[in-house]
């Protein structure tokens, strides 16, 4: 991948996916706003739906507990792994060094 005329990624697809292995937790919540403790993990948020970055599946239980303690009701939930589009957006959105 090129960014600003510089090579920023020159790896096989499987290696790129392994390097950017963060997953996503999509929640449709109601009843209360998302707790502030999860704000750093937010990828997107609109109309009661929030997508959170999960760097490890071990974090999911704690994230859900924080949502429940904040008084949010989880109306729908879905977990997914990063795909090549996510990797591309992550690389292209990163600051140039």
Image (tube, rainbow, N blue to C red):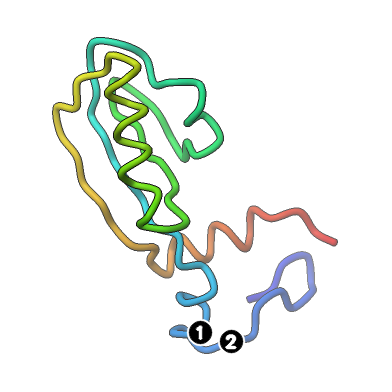
Whether label 1 touches label 2, CB < 8 Å: yes
Q: Position of residue 95 (x, y in %)?
A: 76, 53
Quadrant of the image occupied by residue 76: top left
Q: Residue at x 19, y 20 (%)?
A: 73
- Residue nearest the viewer, comparing 7 with 76: 76
70 with respect to 31 (left or right): right
Mark 2 highlights which residue? Answer: 11
Residue highlighted by disc 1: 15
Q: Nearer the viewer, mark 1 or mark 2?
A: 1
Residue 54 x %, y %: 42, 51
Query: In the depicted view, which residue is nearer to us: 6 or 26?
Result: 26
22 relative to 40 in the view: left or right: left
Q: What is the spatial separation of the Cα atoms under label 1 and label 2, in whole angstroms?
A: 6 Å
Dot 2: what SS?
Answer: loop
Check the picture and name the quadrant holding the N terminus: bottom right
Residue 8 lies, in percent from the top left, at: 71, 74
Q: Name the residue: 30% across, 35% down.
A: 64
């Amino acid at each position: 991948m090129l960014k600003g005329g510089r090579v920023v990624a020159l790896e096989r697809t499987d290696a790129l996916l392994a390097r950017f292995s963060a997953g996503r937790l999509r929640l449709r919540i109601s009843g209360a706003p998302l707790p502030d403790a999860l704000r750093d993990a937010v990828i997107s948020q609109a109309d009661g739906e929030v997508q959170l970055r999960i760097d490890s599946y071990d974090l999911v239980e704690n994230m859900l507990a924080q949502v429940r303690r904040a008084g949010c009701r989880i109306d729908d939930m879905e977990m997914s792994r990063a795909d090549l589009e996510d990797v591309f957006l992550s690389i292209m959105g990163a600051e140039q060094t």
